[in-house]
Amino acid sequence: MEPNTLQSTHSKLVALGMSTASKLTLAGTSLLAVATIFFVHYGQQNEKTAMHAGVLRDIEQQRVKRERQAEFEMQRQLEGEYRKVQNVHDGDEVRREGAAKGP
């Protein structure tokens, strides 16, 4: 504010006959209102940043899950191809045969 405007505002307040206590109360409530607005805005910005970080984290988790699923499917296909080519037995089947033959 320009000095003339400030003096004009002060003159109007004096002309209204405001006491010092009234002026302090007005200044205090104005300061409190500005501080409240600032802190609410700051809190909203923090929440927005945290929510965005959560979205990015979810996207990354989904990407990792898709990669793992694709790798699992590829391993399943390879296992199927190997079973066709090789004669593969389950571990339980081998143990049963060994137990049946005896020592």
Image (spheres, rainbow, N blue to C red):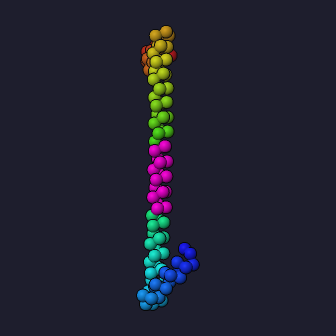
Q: Camera-side residue: 78 or 31? A: 31
For the point 46% across and 31% down, the residue is: 66
The magenta-colored residue range is: 41-57
The image shows residue 37, relative to residue 5, as above or below, that is: above
Q: Camera-side residue: 63 or 49? A: 49
User: Tag count in the figure?
Assistant: 0
Percent of width and height locating residue 6: 53, 79
For the point 49% across and 39% down, the residue is: 60
For the point 46% across and 42% down, the residue is: 58
For the point 48% across and 57% down, the residue is: 45
Q: Is 24 colored magenta in this rendering?
A: no
Percent of width and height locating residue 90: 45, 18
Q: Say whether residue 70 is visible.
A: yes
Which residue reaches farthest right? 3
Percent of width and height locating residue 81: 47, 13
Q: Is 47 colored magenta in this rendering?
A: yes
Q: Camera-side residue: 35 or 11? A: 11
